[in-house]
């Protein structure tokens, strides 16, 4: 199968032989790490070829284009195929092939639970890791379970109960106990922010960048104290812009604070009086850390990419063990 020319990436030269490929395939973005046999990163590749831009037939050519230079030349079947271990939306119903959800309570699914889509190029051996579901109430995660697997892999005592916050477009709160995800809840906070900022009346008064930390903390406190009033509090962003000249940057921080404060009020049974790990180091994760700290919770923020790689590496180690006589 020939890769489209527009997929060829700018990458650093090959410096050691790749042993496997780690992939986090999101809805809008794709992150790929070329790994050696010691689970060290040879190269990082990013692309906007997320699930939302692809049909099932597009995943293999996308990989081939991004991995150009790391695969053996030609399509000979003599060489062993390179394992490609994917988490995220490639395993969704709209993705490459559906990897059925594991039912909580359960440990994060591993390589033995993975779905292997058929590939035309014999140099690829692809594994799609499943997500996790709960039936009552209905909820799903896909991709976050791999970060949780990485978190557990790095704990001194993975059986110890833990509370995990995973900020994102659809943020997750999860309870862990004895190495299992026992329950979790998803909040559409990030998507609501994007919709309100860009497609509601607030688009006239909320900026795309800039920040006001004091306004953010005050807004968190407002909706945490009275989450039922969030609809009125949101409209006040527009009114304050019209009547008092509130800056678009302050409105942006307040909008984020109002939505995160309402989420924290709903998720209070998860985090109140308990240690919390916030998985991520981007601006959004820092917002959750700031909001929780303002509510007298002392969260620990952990690098999300490190945990994703740790979770994918654990799956690769499981694959290697399964092949050991």
Image (spheres, rainbow, N blue to C red):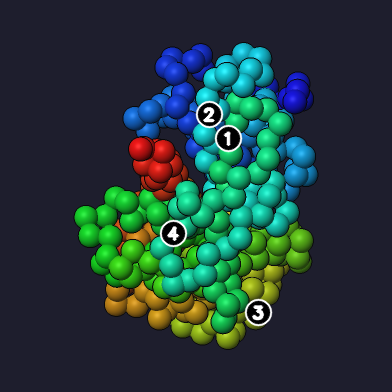
Q: Are marks 1 and 2 in contact (CB under 8 Å)?
A: yes
Residue lying at the far left of the rendered structure: 156
The residue pinned by badge 3 equals: 231
> Which quadrant is the C terminus positioned in?
top left
The answer to whether residue 236 is above or below residue 201 is below
Image coordinates of residue 219 in percent, x first then y, are 50, 71
The residue pinned by badge 4 equals: 108
- Say which of marks 4 and 2 sits in front: 2
The answer to whether residue 217 is above or below residue 34 is below
The answer to whether residue 2 is above or below residue 116 is above
**Label 4 packing within 10 angstroms: few (<14), some (14-19), many (20+):** many
Mark on residue 82? 2
> Alpha-carbon distance for marks 4 and 2?
24 Å
Task: Answer left or right for 84 relative to 178.
Answer: right
- Say which of marks 3 and 2 sits in front: 2
- Say which of marks 3 and 1 sits in front: 1
> Alpha-carbon distance for marks 3 and 1?
49 Å
**Label 2 packing within 10 angstroms: few (<14), some (14-19), many (20+):** some
**Label 3 packing within 10 angstroms: few (<14), some (14-19), many (20+):** few
Decide which of tag 3 and tag 2 comes sooner along the chain: 2
> Alpha-carbon distance for marks 1 and 4?
21 Å
The residue pinned by badge 1 equals: 125
> Alpha-carbon distance for marks 4 and 3?
37 Å
**Residue positioned 29% across, 50% down in the render:** 154
Callout 4: SS: loop
């Amino acid at each position: 199968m020939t890769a489209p020319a527009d997929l060829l990436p700018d990458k650093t030269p090959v410096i050691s032989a790749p042993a496997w490929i780690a992939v986090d395939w999101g809805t809008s973005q794709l992150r790929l790490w070329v790994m050696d046999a010691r689970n060290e990163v040879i190269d990082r590749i990013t692309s906007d070829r997320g699930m939302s831009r692809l049909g099932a037939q597009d995943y293999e050519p996308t990989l081939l284009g991004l991995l150009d230079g790391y695969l053996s030349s030609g399509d000979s079947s003599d060489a062993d195929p390179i394992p490609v271990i994917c988490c995220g939306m490639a395993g969704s119903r709209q993705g490459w092939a559906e990897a059925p959800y594991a039912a909580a309570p359960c440990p994060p699914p591993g390589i033995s639970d993975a779905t292997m889509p058929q590939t035309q190029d014999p140099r690829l051996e692809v594994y799609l890791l499943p997500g996790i579901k709960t039936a009552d109430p209905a909820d799903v995660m896909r991709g976050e379970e791999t970060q949780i697997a990485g978190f557990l892999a790095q704990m001194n005592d993975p059986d110890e109960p833990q509370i995990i916050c995973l900020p994102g477009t659809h943020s997750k709160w999860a309870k862990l106990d004895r190495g299992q995800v026992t329950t979790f809840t998803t909040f559409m906070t990030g998507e609501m922010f994007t919709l309100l900022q860009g497609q509601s009346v607030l688009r006239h008064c909320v900026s795309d960048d800039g920040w006001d930390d004091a306004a953010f903390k005050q807004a968190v406190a407002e909706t945490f104290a009275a989450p039922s009033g969030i609809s009125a509090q949101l409209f006040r962003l527009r009114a304050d812009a019209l009547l008092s000249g509130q800056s678009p940057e302050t409105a942006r921080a307040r909008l984020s604070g109002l939505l995160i404060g309402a989420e924290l009020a709903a998720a209070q049974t998860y985090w109140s009086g308990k240690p919390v790990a916030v998985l991520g180091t981007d601006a959004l994760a820092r917002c959750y850390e700031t909001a929780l700290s303002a509510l007298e919770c002392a969260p620990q923020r952990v690098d999300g990419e490190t945990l994703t790689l740790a979770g994918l590496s654990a799956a690769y180690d499981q694959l290697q063990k399964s092949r050991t006589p």
